[in-house]
Image (tube, rainbow, N blue to C red):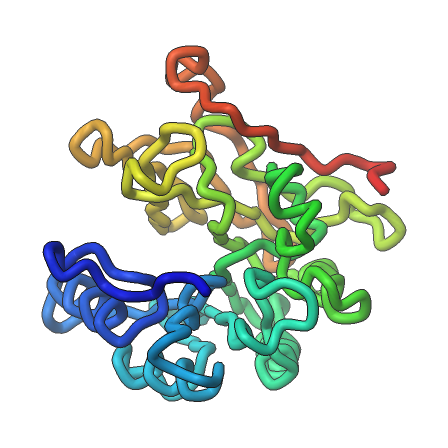
Amino acid sequence: PKNCNHNPHNDLELFAGTTQCHELAATFLNSFVDDIPYDVVGGNHDLEGLQEFKTDEENLAMYLRVHGKDAPYFCREVAEKTLLVGMGSTVFRGAKYISHEVTIDREQMDWFENLVETHPAEEGWKLFVFTHAPPIGSGLRVLQENQIVDGCCWLNHNDEKQRTKFIELVREHRCIKAWFSGHFHLGQDNHGSITFPTIDSKDSPNNRGSCVFAQTSVMRSETTRDARQQSRLLRGNKHGFEICTVDHQKDGKIRVDATVSFEGDASVVCSYTNEDGVYDHEKYAKIVKFHQPTVGDD
């Protein structure tokens, strides 16, 4: 069995999904500004406290309690008719095929569908969504030999009926303006880390509604797959918003990667600000194969 014990010589070296690990994360996240609450979305490692908890339900209850959450999903209005929306994985031990599939359960799916239906773009609503893995159809660059082959690449990857529901909602409900995800441990220095709305046609596999999808990297050198250590910063303005990179290898330097302007209630105008080649790619290259989804993929 996998060794889930903590290192007694290093309190910071914790195994994911344990009470001690989540308490440390909560302490860190609560340390920024006292009067601004934080929220989290559960990923494929957050219920991995295998030796501490016998069931996903017990593990999830601890996760919610430690982070002060009533449910694995959240919705916060941060400005007039502007919502931050998150959904988290609720299955690890009970996964049908692979534990590291990011599973959004039916309760969350129903909640999210009702949310977008009751907050239409025609009334001025704008939603920014956060999940650990991206939905299939986002077009983000993904790991081919790892997550695609293993069946844990996209949200609800192995559920043929549910895995396409997210992109279908994006196409139908133009209130969804951006969707942020991580999961791949890949950096933010290429155009494959951000995808824009393309073809406004219900019959096109490239239809991404009015939503910009953005990949989020990792902060620690031990967890990156391509030597990048980066976070995302979402910055709003009177015209729309900017998607930025926070570079942890350059003392938190902020770089604007894309600008998005609202054009009416149902459309957005997007442009890349960052160009490829910010890094010496050969210097930082690691042995990793990734894939940019394209039309015609099996």
Apparent side of residue 184 relative to residue 104 in the rendered image (left or right): left
Q: Quadrant of the C terminus?
A: top right
| The one of 261 and 75 positioned closer to us in this rendering | 75
> Which residue is painted at 29% across and 43% down in the image?
219
> Which residue is painted at 65% across and 61% down in the image?
174
Name of the residue lying farthest toward the front? 1
> Which residue is painted at 40% across and 42% down in the image?
217
| The one of 247 and 96 positioned closer to us in this rendering | 96
Q: Where is residue 72 in the image (x, y as percent from the top left)?
A: 45, 79
Apparent side of residue 260 relative to residue 3 in the rendered image (left or right): right
Q: Is residue 186 visible?
A: yes
Apparent side of residue 280 relative to residue 38 in the rendered image (left or right): right
| The one of 180 and 172 positioned closer to us in this rendering | 180
- In the rendered image, which quarter is residue 5 located in? bottom left
- In the rendered image, which quarter is residue 16 located in? bottom left
Q: Report the number of numbered marks.
A: 0
